[in-house]
């Protein structure tokens, strides 16, 4: 591959193949970054194993949804209104972060004020 600036590259790839390689900048833990490569297959795997769910609690403060697959909710991040309290129930009982959730289980997310919440999950 010739040396080109990113701005000089083709605007868009036609597809993402499993063998395509990408350069990423990974935090080295000391305030700097290390360049590493990752394949299309590794990107797909990471997205598939750790999907995030964004729950909008703006017009209503309680949202129910059903787990699309076996999973766990590992952490929650309140994107707006960070002082808001959010609770999660699984099948109408209190949920403990990291616990198993089966496909089809009812998940209820409730907030005391309007906010946007990200649920960081692991697909089991």
Image (cartoon, helix red, strand yellow):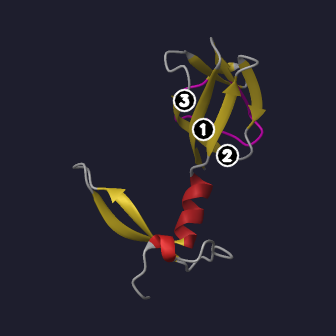
Marks 2 and 3 in Cβ contact (< 8 Å): no
**Residue under numbered circle 3:** 79
Camera-side residue: 7 or 97? 7
Q: Secondary structure at mark 1?
A: strand
Q: Quadrant of residue 35?
A: bottom left
**Residue under numbered circle 2:** 70
The residue furthest top is 112
Measured as percent of width and height from the top left, residue 29 is found at: 26, 50
**Residue under numbered circle 1:** 100
Q: Closer to the N terminus: mark 2 or mark 3?
A: 2
Task: Give the CA distance from mark 2 to mark 3.
Answer: 25 Å
Camera-side residue: 100 or 73? 73
Q: Is residue 34 magenta?
A: no
- Residue drawn at x 42%, y 88% is 2
Q: Closer to the N terminus: mark 3 or mark 1?
A: 3
Task: Give the CA distance from mark 2 to mark 1.
Answer: 7 Å
The residue furthest left is 30
Q: Given this view, does label 3 or label 1 mark the residue nearer the observer?
A: 3
Q: Residues within 10 Å of mark 3 (few under 14, many from 20)?
A: few
- Residue drawn at x 60%, y 29% is 117
Marks 2 and 1 in Cβ contact (< 8 Å): yes
Measured as percent of width and height from the top left, residue 84 is found at: 54, 15
**Which region is colored magenta?**
95-108
Measured as percent of width and height from the top left, residue 25 is found at: 37, 61
Q: Secondary structure at mark 2?
A: loop
């Amino acid at each position: 591959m010739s040396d080109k600036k990113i701005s000089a590259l083709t605007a868009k790839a036609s597809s993402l193949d499993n063998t395509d390689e990408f350069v990423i900048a990974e935090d080295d833990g000391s305030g700097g970054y290390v360049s590493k490569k990752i394949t299309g297959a590794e990107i797909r795997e990471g997205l598939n194993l750790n999907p995030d769910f964004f729950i909008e609690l703006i017009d209503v403060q309680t949202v129910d949804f059903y787990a699309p697959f076996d999973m766990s909710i590992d952490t929650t991040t309140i994107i707006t209104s960070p002082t808001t309290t959010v609770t999660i129930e699984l099948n109408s009982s209190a949920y403990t972060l990291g616990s198993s959730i089966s496909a089809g289980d009812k998940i209820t997310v409730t907030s005391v004020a309007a906010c946007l919440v990200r649920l960081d999950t692991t697909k089991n």
